[in-house]
Image (spheres, helix red, strand yellow):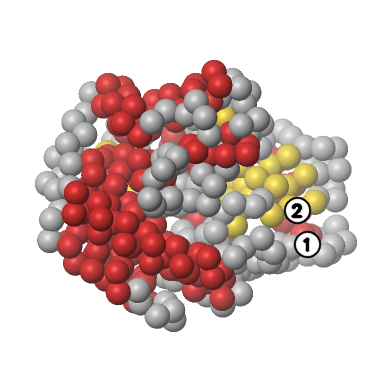
Amino acid sequence: MSTSHPEAQGPAGISVGAITEWLTAVEAERGRTVSAPLQFEQIAGGRSNLTFQVTDDAGSNWALRRPPTGHVLATAHDMSREHRMMSALGPTPVPVPTMVGLCEDVDVNGAPFFVMDWVDGTVVRNRRVAETFDAAARRRMCESVVDTLAAIHAVDVDAVGLGDFAKRDGYVERQLRRWMGQVNATESPTVPELVEAHRRLTESIPEQRETGLIHGDYRLDNTIVDDEGSVVAVLDWELTTLGDPLADVGAMVSYWSRPGDPVVALSDPPTLAEAMMERDEVIERYATASGRSVERVRWYQAFATWRLACILDGVVDRYRAGAMGRDDDFDVEAFASQVTTLSAGALELLDDE
C-alpha cells in the first residue's frame, strides 16, 4: 500500500503511514479532514485488545482498537464483532462511541482494526480517580452504571439487527467450555482451584430464563463518565454476545469491591472510594431498573469471578509471550497470583450460594 506520508515510527502494532492514508480516506467520505501527521498513544488499562488515542496535527482525536500484536488465541479478538455491536447500538439509548470505520485488510496494519470518534470524559480506573469527583458525582456514577446495564439488557436484539449475532441458548454452558478451553490452550501451568471451580460451576448451572444482549465485561472502568458522573459511553465490547443477562449482573457485582472484602477482583478498584453504593444497593437498583429477578445472583458472581481468573490467566500468558506491548507498570507475577486468589474466591462464593 503506497502512502504520500513519510513513514514515522509508531508504537508496536501501528503502521503510521498506512493508517494515516486509510483514516484520511474514510474521514473524507464523512466530509471531514485529517491533518497529518498523526500521533498514536497506547491507552493504559486494557490487557486484551489494544486501544490507542489518535491525534492529528489540528488536535482532532479518535480511538483505534486492534488485537494484541501476536500470540492470539483463535476467535478471541474479533474486531468485526466489536465494531458491529457498537454500530448497532448507536441509535439505541445505550451510550456508545460513534464508529468511523472498520479495516479488515491486514495489509494496512498487520491485523484488522477499527476507529471510532473520541468521547470526552473520564475513565474511572481506580479509587484515586474516583476521589477526584465529589460525593454526589460518585453516587451518580454508581446509579448511572447500573441503569446503563439495565438499558443494555432492554435492547431488542432483533430490532437492531443483532438477532443472529450469537446462539441464544446455553450461554453459561458455552462460556464455561470456552474459557476452560482457552486456559487449556495457554502455555502457563493450570491452577488447581480454577479447575475445581469450573467443575462445581458446571454441575450447578441455573436455568437460563431469557436471552438478552450481554456486554461480557461490564464494570465502571469500562465506561466513560462526564463531570457529573453520568455514563456517556460504554467501552470494550470484545466479549459481547447473546445470553443470560444475569451473567452481566454477576460480573458487575464481582468487580464492585467494597472496603473489607476478602477478595478484590481489580487492583485498587474505584468502588472502594467513599460515597459509592454498597453491593446490595447495586443489586437492588438493577432489579428495580430492569424489572428482573436477581435470584441466585451469588452463583453468577462466582461464575464471573472464575471467568475473570481465566481471563487473567490468558493475559499472563500473552504478556509473557510479548504480545501485549510494553507496559512498565504491569506486574505479571501479581496477575499470576490473582488467578489463584480469584479461583479460590469463586469456590467460597459457591460454598455460600
Q: How many marks?
A: 2
Residue 266 shows in the view: yes
Give the residue pinned by disc 1: 10
- Residue farthest toward the front in the current orientation of the protein: 260
Q: Residue at x 27, y 21 (%)?
A: 288
Rendering coords of residue 126 (x, y %): 57, 42
Callout 1 secondary element: loop
Q: Quadrant of residue 329?
A: bottom right
Above or below for 188 versus 297 = below
Rendering coords of residue 5 (x, y %): 85, 57
Above or below for 228 versus 131 = above
Drawn side of residue 306 relative to residue 138, left or right: left
Q: Amino acid at mark 1?
A: Gly
Above or below for 211 versus 193 = above
What is the distance, in whole Å, between disc 1 and disc 2 at their CAs? 7 Å
Badges 1 and 2: C-beta atoms under 8 Å apart? yes
Marking on residue 148 = none
Q: Residue at x 38, y 50 (%)?
A: 262
Nearer to us in this view, 114 or 310: 310
Q: Amino acid at mark 2?
A: Phe
Q: How many neighbours does mark 2 have within 10 angstroms: few (below 14), some (14-19), or many (20 or more)? A: many
Marking on residue 40 = 2
Q: Residue at x 72, y 33 (%)?
A: 31
